């Protein structure tokens, strides 16, 4: 079966990860724009980061037969650097409408400050104006309150609930999100917070409708194989195959394909390792192994 | 003339929605869309045209060659065709405002847009304004971007200095690009280029790795002793395809005595050998040997 990891920061991962992900059946990923583990000091840093998400990283993924999409947004942490955040908002339109950008994200709240709210609202307005999906990062502290507020503010801005994905849910927040009509994504963290075992129980209790599993793997301790591992655990624990397919592939696809930036027909086909990234119809390279034995020539 | 041809090729391939977008974009451009407004048009083009091959007919290919010798859109996709048309539809192409804005577009361009921007360069007036930008494409890690400037275009051979030109050709060799599509290669097979290719071959040999087929296009009539040694040493273990390329290479490198001595029996190699002996060894003769060159379709 093929898997979709709709939240993973591949820029922080190695080619070993790409190789293992492809081998585990991950066919497509979404890389949301986030912070770098330390604060940016100038807008050029945002520009080069966004450019790498729609450029080099996508190319890197294609060498392993993984389709790479991304979201563009100004994260909540850095929204608190008000001057910089405003400059970043100005260049947002230069990246947000590009090919393969499936949402505005990950945006929302961190400490729930007025500066965060300002940046969140401006980005929601942009999304509504350009008919885009929104991916919301929910805060680690005061999560439940942060999620309710994220949904309310998005609704006020005119975001249709079927175009809103709330991420990093847990058992305490899932009811509110599902009741609002938004998509509820769950990040599977190794060791702490939301583990695969708890995810299995969520799917058992709520069913698969509008439930999305992701890894959010980044530069911290995290597991880029969370999605296939969780799927396998669901299988072992007797969750039916249709529910697994929806929560680990179909729902993410349905949510983000609303962007018009995912070629679903192309994704349904087996992976093509195409170093020229030409996405054309030729079948010459189909089934060929990724060229991981050679360094990227330059 | 190229511009009219490109518009014609595009219009035949646009969807109805795409045509509406194109018409609207044209009026925005006439009204002076630039900067973020222009970037938006390039980005939104991805909603109206996909990365599908153009599927050009023989007539269309010939028309392209006729419009600008050494140039061909055969490897372009439909999205690139739309984007290049958007660029060429700007009313300020010869002006300073365009020059500045064109350069600024690269800062925000994604991979597909970058390729389209580079593909437009040989078609812009006063091409010499964009030489530095074009050499930037040769420093990329992405093969698509490199090929957008390096292949099917007369721009590098016309505008690059020796350093940039040699780097382009040797990078194309490294990346295993179809070198017969580097326009003007035959005119600029310098002693320096031949030496660099021979050095590359020695490195590959020491590492126990195969040669790329493009090697045999990089050898001019220079460094006779080394070229002869390479031909002689490699011939016994060469594949049929390599042998076909080697006999052409020998003729190009002035190794007529070696060429006469090999007398290949293989029916795959024989026609190339006969061509070479009769002096037909220009870069286009290599084309059929790059049969798995999917980027050309
Ligand atoms: Zn994240």
Image (cartoon, rainbow, N blue to C red):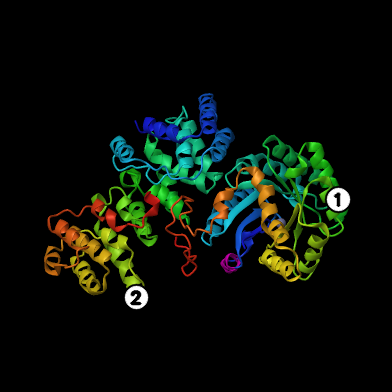
Residue identified by numbered label 2: B206
Question: Residue B86: where, in percent of width, then height?
Answer: 48, 33
- In front: A94, or A168? A168
- In front: B150, or A213? A213
- In front: B296, or B176? B296
Viewed as shown, does residue B257 lie left or right of A252? left
Ligand 1 rendered quadrant = bottom right
Question: Residue A34: where, in percent of width, then height?
Answer: 69, 54
Viewed as shown, does residue B272 lie left or right of A101? left
Disc 1, SS: helix
Residue A73 shows in this picture: no
Task: Determine which quarter of the picture holds residue B131.
Answer: top left
Q: Which residues are magenta?
A: A15-23
Disc 2: host chain: B
Viewed as shown, does residue B287 lie left or right of A6? left
- Asked if the stretch drawn in magenta spans residue A17, the answer is yes
> Which dot marks residue A176?
1
| Neighbour tally class for label 1: few under 14, some 14-19, many 20 plus, Cα within 10 Å | some
Task: Determine which quarter of the picture holds residue A129.
Answer: top right
Does label 1 point to a residue whose CB lies under 8 Å from ligand 1? no
Disc 1: host chain: A
Question: Residue A195: where, in percent of width, then height?
Answer: 78, 67
- Asked if the stretch drawn in magenta spans residue A210, the answer is no
For marks 1 and 2, give the CA distance: 65 Å
């Amino acid at each position: 079966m093929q898997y979709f990891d709709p939240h993973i920061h591949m820029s922080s991962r190695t080619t070993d990860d790409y190789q293992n992900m492809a081998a585990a059946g991950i066919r497509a990923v979404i890389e949301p724009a986030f912070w770098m583990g330390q604060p940016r000091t100038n807008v050029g840093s945002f520009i080069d980061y966004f450019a790498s998400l729609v450029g080099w990283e996508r190319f890197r993924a294609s060498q392993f037969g993984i389709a790479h999409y991304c979201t563009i947004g100004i994260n909540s942490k850095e929204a608190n650097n008000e001057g910089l955040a405003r400059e970043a908002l100005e260049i947002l339109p230069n990246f947000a409408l590009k090919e393969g950008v499936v949402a505005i994200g990950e945006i929302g709240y961190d400490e729930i400050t007025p500066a965060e709210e300002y940046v969140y609202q401006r980005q929601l307005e942009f999304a509504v104006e350009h008919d885009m999906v929104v991916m919301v990062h929910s805060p680690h502290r005061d999560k439940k309150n942060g999620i309710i507020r994220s949904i309310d503010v998005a609704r006020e801005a005119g975001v249709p609930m079927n175009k809103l994905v709330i991420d990093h849910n847990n058992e305490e927040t899932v009811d509110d999100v599902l009741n609002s009509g938004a998509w509820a994504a769950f990040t599977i963290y190794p060791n702490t917070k939301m583990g695969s075992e708890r995810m299995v129980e969520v799917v058992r209790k709520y069913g698969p409708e509008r439930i999305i599993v992701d890894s959010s793997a980044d530069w911290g301790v995290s597991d880029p194989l969370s999605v296939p591992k969780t799927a396998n655990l669901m299988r072992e624990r007797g969750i039916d195959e249709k529910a697994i397919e929806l929560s680990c592939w179909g729902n993410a696809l349905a949510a983000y394909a609303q962007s018009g930036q995912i070629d679903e027909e192309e994704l349904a086909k087996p992976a093509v390792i195409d170093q020229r990234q030409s996405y054309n119809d030729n079948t010459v390279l189909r089934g060929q192994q990724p060229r991981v034995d050679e360094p990227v020539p330059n | 003339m190229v511009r009219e041809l490109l518009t014609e090729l595009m219009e035949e391939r646009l969807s109805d929605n795409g045509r509406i977008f194109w018409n609207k974009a044209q009026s925005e451009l006439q009204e002076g869309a630039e900067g973020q407004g222009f970037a938006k048009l390039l980005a939104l083009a991805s909603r109206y045209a996909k990365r599908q091959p153009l599927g050009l007919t023989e007539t269309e290919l010939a028309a392209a060659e006729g419009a600008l010798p050494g140039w061909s859109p055969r490897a372009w996709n439909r999205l690139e065709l739309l984007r290049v048309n958007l660029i060429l539809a700007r009313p300020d192409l010869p002006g300073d405002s365009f020059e500045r804005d064109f350069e600024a577009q690269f800062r925000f361009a994604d991979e597909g847009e970058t390729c389209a921007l580079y593909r437009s360069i040989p078609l812009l007036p006063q091409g010499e304004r964009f030489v530095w930008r074009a050499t930037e494409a040769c420093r990329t890690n992405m093969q698509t971007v490199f090929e957008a400037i390096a292949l099917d275009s007369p721009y590098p051979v016309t505008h690059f200095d020796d350093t940039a030109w040699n780097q382009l050709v040797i990078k194309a060799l490294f990346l295993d690009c179809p070198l017969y599509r580097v326009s003007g290669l035959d005119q600029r097979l310098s002693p320096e280029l031949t030496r660099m290719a021979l050095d590359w071959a020695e490195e590959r040999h020491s590492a126990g790795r195969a040669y790329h087929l493009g090697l045999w296009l990089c050898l001019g009539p220079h460094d006779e002793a080394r070229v002869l040694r390479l031909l002689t040493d490699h011939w016994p273990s060469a594949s049929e395809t390599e042998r076909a390329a080697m006999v052409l290479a020998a003729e190009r490198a002035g190794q007529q005595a070696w060429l006469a001595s090999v007398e290949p029996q293989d029916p795959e190699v024989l026609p190339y050998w006969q061509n070479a002996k009769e002096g037909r060894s220009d870069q286009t003769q290599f084309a059929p040997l790059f049969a798995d060159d999917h980027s050309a379709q």
